[in-house]
Amino acid sequence: MDTFVSELMAKMTLKEKIGQMNLLSVGADVTGPVLSEGVEEKIDNGQVGGLFNMYGPSAVRQLQQRVMEKSRLKIPMIFGYDVIHGHRTIFPIPLALSSSWDLNLIQRTAIAAASEASADGLNWVFSPMVDITRDPRWGRVMEGAGEDTYLGSQIARAMVVGYQGKEKMLGTDNVLACVKHFALYGAAEAGRDYNTVDMSRQRMYNEYLAPYKAAVDANVGSVMTSFNEVDGIPASGNKWLLTDLLRKQWGFKGFVATDYTAINEMVAHGVGDEKQVTALALNAGSEMDMVGELFSNHAEELVKSGQVPIKKIDEACRRILEAKHKLGLFADPFRYCNEERAITQILSSDKIALSKEAAVKSMVLLKNENNVLPLKASQKVAFIGPFIKDQGNQLGSWSGAGRSQDCVSLWQALETAGLAKQCTYAKGCNILDDQALIARLNRDGASLALDAKSPQEMIDQAVETVKNADIAVVVLGEPAAMSGEASSRTAIGLFDHQIALLQALKKTGKPIVLVLMNGRPLTLTWEDQNMDAILETWFGGLQAGPATVDVLFGHANPSAKLSMTFPRNVGQIPIHYNSKNTGRPFVENSKYKTQYLDASNTPLYPFGFGLSYAQFDYSNLALSSPTIKANQSLNVSATVSNTSKTDGIETVQLYIRDMVASVTRPVKELKGFQKILLKAGESKTVSFTLSPDDLRFYDSDLNFVAEPGDFQVFVGGNSRDTKEATFKLLAP
Ligand code: BGC
């Protein structure tokens, strides 16, 4: 590869090298302003390295053919797309998948997405998104793995390997992955998208950077910069971030692409004019310019005037050519344009089955008073809610190639399962009833409408339907368009008109199961007090309907656990389990302690929480030794028993707390988890190994160290309810 790339680069003009660094958007599926014009002519002139937002083997073949026929050096282009939770077979949104805590499952979704995307002409996916998120107001929490560093890092690795495979040379059913958004995008102030990020190095190194690094360690082929600033400098122009940290400290070998027009946006950030920000980006280590075309417009002049060393261009061009080589594009530019594969791979039955499995394993049971769930075969069930016959919202945001006609709605699933006979239906309310908001979302591509019936008529009909049933299943939530990019909210509860429906149904005295479809943690304090059961199904993808039916009727037992805390109210945000103790930790009935006057400090549902139709009990927490020496491991074991009459899967979680250190440490940190199947009445001993690395953290000089002293160990089924033990790390 090295010789091949060197020989090719020796033939390239400066303009052609800069051409490789130009990424343009084509096609109708655009996520921002379209700045590119005359794409074909640019392709002919060797001024385009890659294209995105277009798929299909013949469409891709046509443009690849063009570069092979018309351009001087015939360098194939790469074709990218936002394949975020599946390509045509849409899986649950990433936040949902992360709730499965099932790395094998998540990896299988990435393998399936890679197989389908590569059969559809693509060879580069803008995934995984690994931004740690602690603010559910931010609409992009749906794209990531939630709030935890450890879980997020495991998932990042699983996805990169799933997309790219384990080999250096990618197979035809692999694609190049792109970890994003580097870095810290999930910490946008106030949860407002694109907002400022400001963070200490302590927090960065100990809490936010690990998932990106895990992707780099897993050999991710590309990194995408974020829109936000890091330490006052926008990420795409931040030399510390892109060169010192990413290249020098982490040894990243792939190429760095910017986010959509992120270099141009540095002008609005206020760090220079177009030419200055281009120089900043190049000198910092940005290597492929997404859509903005500033490299095309200014890089040549910047090199000639000495403002950017030619070395920067050579390095960038080499890394992009290396990626193309690894994808096998020099051997066969049409390697990913195989119509046969498109027919056999896209929406294949194994992928659809995986989509259903993933949806089942992503659903979190938040409440189940008196075991109202699962529903019984003898019950007459009233299904109420505007999502029940809806086929589109279950795709969730970032499902560009997904199609609503491939979705199976809840009602269709009831019919197919032969259960519709025992069920009745009323819509109950609109998904949204705020006309201005509907108009705004529809302007940006949603298709929300108001029902011809008045809100009161819909409620009355729903009340009648419930009165004639034994139990109500009410499906409510957010439209898909209210999470994802540029979809932040200041209130994250169910809409008032949806609560009005629940209040009216509550008066019937019938048990109510609330089924939620949404893209972020919601505030559910009233619902928790008033509903008999709550099942969080997120946006479950193509098979959300059948998966929900399986869980509701007990054909499947829920096993997912929250990967992000559910607050009681918006005022508690940011709220996450791994907080610091402070100098004034909370003490009941004591004034000068960290607390609110009007709400407790605790969340409604903590990180790691999720119920099952089975019940699990923890006992016998034991450590292999009360003390360990530096570089020794510790074995932690506990007995987990299924005390119910139902088989179930439990996710056993291991946390630690470093009691005394040179910098303050969180009150709990996840360090391991295991999913175990326990038959009714069965007990198992689960063991974990705490390795020396698990005890390390970045100290104030950013050295990764373990410091002697006392540690606590916690094992339990969520981050709140745990058994605990202590051990001491001895001085060397
Ligand atoms: C998003 C990225 C995405 C890119 C390309 C941007 O607006 O922030 O996550 O990959 O668009 O569609």
Image: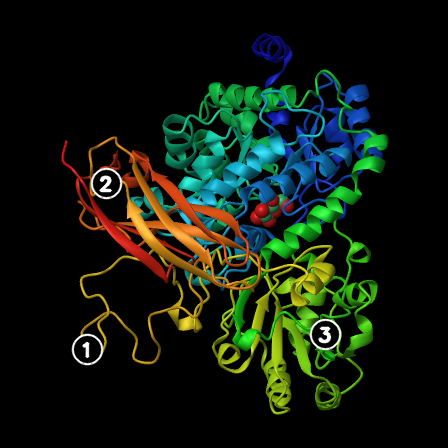
Disc 1 residue type? Lys
Disc 2 residue type? Ser
What colour scheme has been applied to the protein in the rendered image?
rainbow
Classed neighbour count for the residue bearing mark 3: other residues with Cα under 10 Å, few (<14), some (14–19), many (≥20): many
Q: Quadrant of residue 221?
A: top right
Disc 2 is placed on an element classified as loop
**Which callout, 2 or 1, points to the residue nearer the camera?**
2
Relative depth, front residue between 385 and 302: 385
Relative depth, front residue between 518 and 179: 518
Q: CA distance from mark 3 to mark 2?
A: 56 Å
Among numbered discs 2 and 1, the one appearing first in the sequence: 1
* Mark carried by residue 20: none
Among numbered discs 1 and 3, the one appearing first in the sequence: 3
Cβ–Cβ below 8 Å for labels 3 and 2?
no
Disc 1 is placed on an element classified as loop
Please name the residue that numbered disc 3 is placed on. 386
Among numbered discs 3 and 2, the one appearing first in the sequence: 3
* Mark carried by residue 625: 2
Residue 202, compared with residue 284, is above or below; it is below
**Residue sticking out furthest to the front:** 681
Residue 436 on image: x %, y %: 66, 76
**Which callout, 3 or 2, points to the residue nearer the camera?**
2
Relative depth, front residue between 493 and 628: 628
Residue 382 on image: x %, y %: 73, 80
Is 203 left or right of 297, judged from the image as shown? Answer: left
Q: In which quadrant of the rendered image does the C terminus lie?
A: top left
Relative depth, front residue between 479 and 517: 517
Q: CA distance from mark 1 to mark 3?
A: 46 Å
Q: CA distance from mark 2 to mark 1?
A: 40 Å
* Mark carried by residue 591: 1
Is 403 left or right of 622, judged from the image as shown? Answer: right
**Residue visible at 70% across and 23% down in the picture:** 46
